[in-house]
Amino acid sequence: MHPALALLPDFALILLGFGLRRFMHLGDHFWSGLEKLVYFVLFPALLFHAIARTRIDFAAAAPFIASGAAALCGGALLGWLAQPLFGARPMVFASQFQCAFRFNSYIGLAVAAKLHGEAGIAAMGILIGAMVPLANLASVWMLARHGGAGVLREIARNPLILATAAGLLFNLSGATLPEAAGHFLGRLAEASIALGLLAVGAALKLRGVAGNPLPSAFLGGVKLLAVPAIAWGAARATGLEGVYFDVVVVFGALPTASSAYILAMRMGGDGAGVAWLISATTLGAMLTLPLWLVALGTA
């Protein structure tokens, strides 16, 4: 099956999560608890398990991370250029600005697993671990011009960064996971992607954005079209191939993460507008991400 078609089950899980939240009436506390379980337990287990067991080409890691950083910074720069479109609403711009470059790790790990198995998960995990601090710094810097936050503390406590760092240290040590520990982490990893995608779907909000839709449309286009194009160009320029090339392009093509909404709400920003952009880019990625995978297959 072509990788683009192989994404259909993952997108179906997102849509199922959307339907379950609206029709099963499980309550917000259930979905909040599920997201915490995925974020703090299941996805860290998936990352550690994959990185600890995979042979990593550290010589290619520097251009790989540089390509991801180029894509993220390119999105931030293009997002900043949208400021005049927001008129005299600086806090609205500061909130939505981050949607031009933040990325949904759950979908990224699911797609990387589809393309390259554990090697893809390990590569995406390394990139996520390197890019989360950069994305948080850029987001908080813009919002901090009108608010305040402890970004360094948030980064230091991020479970995805901690799991990536622990997996890399274990990998470098040359040790081998005990069989029982490997099976335990493997069971958690198996549950992580399906539950993570259900949580993504449950968080979708389809209520339209108020006011001028042009700024939101511009930022969504930057995230789904311009950022992956920059990632592709940077990967070509740095000579990436195989798993690393595919993963950095997928990373660029990911929709915006729900963490953008959380940050905007914590800092008194435009939560409703950010929630709509997250949902719009997630639904839009169901069309654009398969197209980028088709391009990868013909490259």
Image: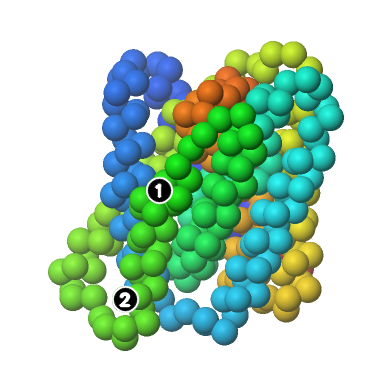
Q: Is residue 6 at least partly visible in the picture?
A: no
Residues at marks 1 and 2 touching, judged by CB atoms closer than 8 Å: no
Give the amino acid at mark 2.
Answer: Phe
Query: Which residue shows up at 74% across the image and 13% down it?
Result: 211
- Element carrying mark 2: helix
Query: Which residue shows up at 79% across the image and 32% down it?
Result: 83
Q: Is residue 187 at least partly visible in the picture?
A: yes
- For residue 2, which quarter of the picture? bottom right
| Dot 2 alpha-carbon crowd within 10 angstroms: few under 14, some 14 to 19, many 20 or more | some
Tell me the quarter of the image containing the C terminus.
bottom right
The CA distance from mark 1 to mark 2 is 24 Å
Q: Earlier in the sequence, mark 1 or mark 2?
A: 1
Q: Position of residue 67 (x, y in %)?
A: 68, 66
Q: Which residue is mark 1?
A: 153
- For residue 257, which quarter of the picture? top right
- For residue 161, which quarter of the picture? bottom left
| Image vertical order of residue 237 relative to residue 107, above or below | below
